[in-house]
Amino acid sequence: MAGTILKLDEIEVFDRGSGIKSIPLVGGGLGAQGIATGMTVFPPGGGIVEHWHNVEESVTVLAGSGTAEMAGEQAPVSQYDATYIPAGVPHRFINTGDSEMRILWVYGGTEVTRTVAATGETFKHLSAEDTTGTGG
């Protein structure tokens, strides 16, 4: 099987509301084995609710700056900073800058769920039901 070139303007965008958009890039639908990856775009002031996943996650800031919160601890993040989040660790990202923030996320699996900390509700990541709060 040949590889696939992904053009961002040709990929379905998952609108999270409040100007936040998630863009799935590679996952079960493209034949990836063991990872799912995509981007989330945050407008200035945009953020996601605290949540956790059933698999580990790595997040790299591609553009902009903001705050990463993991297990209640906050740290500033800027372009090219990367985070590692073990499965089950509550986290969130907030754009505290004055320009768009883009993050690249990579999950250690293709069957990813997202549990919203405030409600305990669990959804298949980026499914039609995964609309509580915003973000990746």
Image (spheres, rainbow, N blue to C red):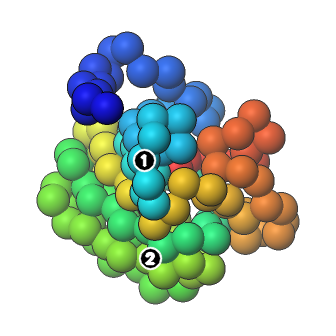
Kind of residue at disc 1: Ala
Residue 118 in percent (x, y) is at: 78, 68
Tag 2's secondary structure?
strand
Kind of residue at disc 2: Ile
Res 44 visible? no
Res 112 visible? yes
Q: Residue at x 37, y 14 (%)?
A: 10
Q: Residue furthest top?
A: 10
Residue 26 sits above or below residue 119 on the image:
above
Please name the residue that numbered disc 2 is placed on: 85
Q: Nearer the viewer, residue 2 or 80?
A: 2
Task: Judge left or right: residue 70 versus residue 67.
Answer: right
**Mark 2 against mark 1, which lies toward the viewer?**
1
Q: Which residue is drawn at 62% across and 79% down?
A: 88
Q: Which of 28 and 40 is in front in this view?
A: 28
Q: Which residue is drawn at 53% across and 35% down?
A: 29
Task: Judge left or right: residue 101 versus residue 115.
Answer: left
Q: Which residue is drawn at 50% across and 21% down?
A: 12
Task: Judge left or right: residue 17 versus residue 21.
Answer: right
Please name the residue that numbered disc 1 is placed on: 32
Residue 131 in percent (x, y) is at: 73, 41
- State how far apart marks 2 and 1 are (Cα): 21 Å
Circle 1: is it few (<14), some (14-19), or many (20+) Cα within 10 Å?
A: few
Q: Residue 111's image quarter?
A: bottom right
Tag 1's secondary structure?
loop
Q: Nearer the viewer, residue 1 or 25?
A: 1
